[in-house]
């Protein structure tokens, strides 16, 4: 490879805000972030994938116990949370499109609603968890449910708590991300030419949503 | 890419450029908070070398204990901890990050003609997460050690009273470091190549690192969740791996090897990537079969996900599954063979220059050939039943991992050392050390093939008297190998005391990293390079100037 040298644009006078020094232009920076984000989302899917496979194997092995154990879950609460998360995904989409259109007030509004919905999801989850704790429907050796049950039902709750717990941690992480976006949005950092962080935060939030869409029927709706 | 018309070469006067990355900023903080991929690569380099030393000390102690049957220097319990720590440190703290995170971090953006990796802050985070993981690993060592073997097999790992939970947590944390590096490199390779550098004008090191990054991203999360499940099993008895509670210990093996078999390709692919750089440079010839080598890296990455069951031929997996896994395992030999034959064809009629990096490349070819071929014995169902869990497996694994990856790593270190630090090392001592390492390695591990075929099981503390001579051979070999490695450390460190004396391109290399000064300036290139030629084009058009050595 022979190289003719072209002059570097690294200290070009019109440096767009938000462009890091090692990128030549905004588009390259946004594309890099997108590729990185998708690669990261793949790791997330595989992380949950491991749990899903473990759950599937144990479900196949102890079908009766899992079916009987899942009756302890509250389908109304589960459905409510599904609706909450789906709505939050919609508000997130609206936030991204507001950012793209440069409507700063709408961006702040939609991000706030998304944050509140995420919080509502965790409140419902808390109510569900405290009910389970109260009844002794706990994972592994902490399972102390007094009512009639099959011997392997505790295994269902092992998975229930690990899967929803890991998902809950992701919701929490999502709330931190959205709060950070909200702060920057209020400060006026974003514009139609620079809203990449909102876009990336949106992708992450949709992933959290999609995982729940798989978790919900897998745990709440088996028979 | 042998020349860049514009860069002024300050090395002529032996005086570093003012903006040389090592001197661009000063002070402790300028290192620990640096976003410069070169400095992060250097920090990774010293860290993995420290871990290599630690893991090496455990290895020497294990070999010393095995000098005689029964107790030589330690009790059986201590011995179990020693071989576990040797494995865990070498795998998780040394060999996985060794090439991508240290040499890769340093060289990859230079090879692409980029100013940095795509996400410099993520890169720094990756390093510090590595350090946190290493700290947890050390905590596990001093609070009781671990005696399960580095594979943490259940059910023993769920019942062992040693610090398994801490060590698995350390490996879990280290996984994040590895994922961050992988994500970063994928985005960098996709989006930060210099103008004119198409995929097929990209150096083969980049292809190898790319294939590695894909495996890091796809496989590591599975290890993460597996280790979480193991920790949950130990803390909450969740019942997934514990047969008393309805769980399945073989499920752990499936989960574990679904990561850990691809992980051995995380270890070997970067080694192969280095060899693809060294051989054309020191044969003064274009690489033979560029596309075949590039595609074979991707093919190895792909097949690596389909062979994990060959670790479980005797774990009660169905015969059909074993037969399929055995067949798929044999497929790995094809892209590996493609690489080896292309390297040999590159050397054929080349003008071979036996400098230290080339010595290691040739060593790699010989040792990896043995390591790869003995892998076929283990991939075949009938022979594996005899050889499973014997020293044959230990020898095979070390031929691939030490004879392959570590030798390539040392070769790459010699190749890029002048670029990284601007200093030339003593070629004479480098040759002496290379010979010692080659002899020491073979004396250590060749007898282990024989021990294995004769029935010596791996990880045993005690053995029959008839095995003693070969064990003694192996132990003496480990001393020679250790001596060779210490000599390497010695002359490399000694070279740092010299003035900057490395020219920009000491070996006549053709890839972009050789077009900038040694050591490079903080922003890598004075001007954004534009690529028009193939990566290993040694034809005289731009008259490569191998400026002495």
Image (tube, rainbow, N blue to C red):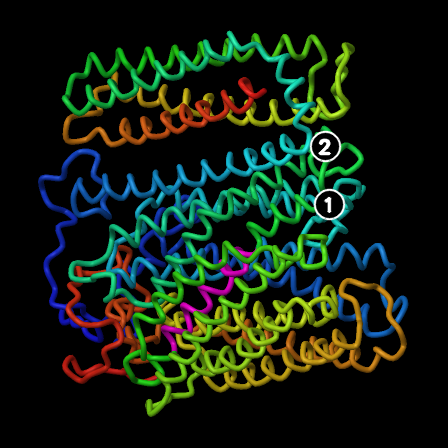
User: On the rendered image, what quadrant is the C terminus of chain A found in?
Assistant: top right
B248 vs B344, left or right, is right
User: On the rendered image, what quadrant is the N terminus of chain A found in?
Assistant: bottom left
Residue A181: x and y in percent read 31, 22
State the SS at label 1. Answer: loop
- The chain letter under disc 2 is B
Give the vertical position of B478 relative to B301 (above or below).
below
The residue indicated by pointer 2 is B239
Q: Which residue is rendered at x = 49% and y = 66% of the image?
A: B332
Residue B506: x and y in percent read 32, 78
Question: What's the CA distance linking mark 2 and mark 1?
Answer: 12 Å
Crowd around label 2: few <14 · some 14–19 · many ≥20 (10 Å): many
Looking at the image, can residue B47 be seen? no
- Name the one closer to the observer, A170 or B379: B379
Instruction: Choose top left, top right, bottom left or bottom right for residue B520.
Output: bottom left
* Magenta span of residues: B261-278
Residue A48 in magenta? no
Looking at the image, can residue B327 be seen? yes
């Amino acid at each position: 490879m022979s190289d003719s040298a072209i002059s570097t644009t690294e200290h070009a006078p019109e440096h767009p805000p938000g462009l890091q020094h090692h990128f030549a232009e905004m588009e390259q920076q946004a594309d890099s972030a997108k590729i990185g984000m998708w690669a990261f989302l793949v790791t997330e899917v595989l992380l949950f994938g491991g749990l899903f496979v473990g759950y599937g194997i144990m479900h196949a092995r102890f079908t009766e116990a899992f079916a009987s154990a899942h009756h302890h879950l509250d389908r109304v609460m589960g459905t409510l949370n599904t609706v909450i998360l789906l709505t939050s995904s919609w508000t997130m989409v609206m936030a991204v499109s507001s950012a793209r259109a440069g409507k700063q007030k709408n961006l702040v509004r939609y991000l706030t609603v998304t944050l509140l919905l995420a919080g509502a999801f965790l409140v419902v989850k808390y109510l569900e968890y405290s009910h389970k704790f109260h009844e002794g429907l706990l994972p592994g050796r902490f399972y102390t449910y007094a009512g009639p049950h099959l011997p392997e039902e505790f295994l269902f709750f092992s998975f229930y708590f690990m899967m929803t717990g890991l998902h809950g941690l992701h919701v929490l992480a999502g709330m931190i991300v959205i709060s950070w976006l909200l702060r920057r949005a209020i400060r006026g950092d974003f514009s139609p030419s620079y809203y990449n962080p909102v876009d990336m935060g949106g992708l992450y939030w949709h992933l959290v949503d999609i995982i729940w869409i798989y978790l919900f029927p897998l745990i709440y709706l088996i028979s | 890419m042998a020349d860049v018309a514009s860069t002024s070469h300050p090395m002529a006067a032996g005086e570093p450029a003012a903006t040389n990355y090592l001197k661009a900023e000063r002070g402790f903080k300028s290192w620990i908070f640096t976003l410069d991929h070169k400095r992060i690569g250097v920090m990774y380099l010293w860290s993995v070398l420290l871990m290599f030393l630690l893991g090496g000390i455990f290895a020497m102690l294990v070999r010393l204990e095995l000098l005689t049957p029964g107790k030589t220097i330690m009790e059986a319990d201590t011995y179990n901890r020693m071989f576990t720590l040797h494995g865990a440190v070498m795998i998780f703290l040394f060999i996985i990050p060794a090439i991508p995170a240290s040499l890769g971090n340093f060289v990859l953006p230079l090879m692409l003609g980029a100013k940095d990796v795509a996400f410099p802050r993520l890169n720094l985070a990756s390093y510090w997460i590595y350090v946190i993981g290493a700290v947890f690993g050390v905590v596990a060592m001093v609070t009781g050690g671990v005696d399960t073997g580095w594979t943490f097999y259940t059910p023993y790992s769920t019942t062992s009273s040693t610090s398994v939970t801490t060590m698995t947590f350390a490996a879990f944390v280290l996984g994040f470091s590895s994922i961050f590096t992988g994500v970063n490199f994928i985005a960098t390779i996709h989006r930060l190549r210099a103008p004119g550098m198409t995929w097929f004008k990209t150096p083969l090191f980049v292809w190898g690192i790319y294939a590695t990054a894909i495996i890091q991203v796809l496989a590591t999360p599975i290890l993460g969740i597996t280790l979480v499940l193991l920790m949950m099993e130990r803390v909450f008895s969740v019942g997934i791996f514990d047969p008393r509670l309805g769980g399945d210990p073989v499920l752990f093996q499936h989960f574990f090897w679904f990561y850990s078999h691809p992980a051995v390709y995380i270890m070997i692919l970067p080694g192969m990537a280095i060899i693809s750089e060294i051989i054309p440079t020191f044969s003064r010839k274009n690489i033979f079969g560029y596309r075949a080598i590039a595609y074979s890296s991707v093919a190895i990455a792909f097949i690596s996900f389909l062979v994990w069951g060959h670790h479980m031929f005797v774990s009660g997996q169905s015969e059909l599954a074993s037969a399929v896994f055995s067949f798929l395992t044999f497929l790995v030999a094809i892209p590996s063979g493609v690489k080896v034959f292309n390297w040999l064809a590159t050397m054929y009629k080349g003008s071979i220059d036996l400098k230290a990096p080339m010595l290691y490349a040739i060593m790699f070819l010989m040792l990896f050939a043995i390591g790869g071929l003995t892998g076929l014995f283990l991939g075949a169902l009938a022979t594996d039943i005899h050889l499973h869990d014997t020293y044959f497996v230990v020898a095979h694994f070390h031929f691939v991992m030490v004879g392959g990856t570590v030798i390539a790593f040392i070769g790459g270190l010699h190749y890029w050392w002048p670029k990284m630090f601007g200093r030339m090392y003593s070629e004479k001592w480098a040759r002496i050390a290379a010979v010692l390492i080659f002899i020491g390695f073979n004396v250590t591990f060749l007898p282990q093939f024989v021990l294995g075929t004769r029935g010596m099981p791996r990880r045993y503390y005690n053995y029959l008297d008839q095995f003693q001579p070969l064990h003694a051979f192996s132990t003496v070999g480990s001393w020679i190998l250790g001596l060779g490695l210490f000599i390497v450390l010695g002359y490399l460190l000694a070279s740092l005391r010299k003035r900057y004396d490395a020219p920009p391109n000491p070996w006549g290399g053709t890839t972009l990293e050789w077009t900038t000064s040694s050591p490079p300036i903080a922003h890598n290139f004075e001007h954004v390079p534009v690529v028009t030629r193939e990566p290993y084009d040694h034809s005289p058009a731009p008259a490569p100037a191998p400026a002495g050595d």
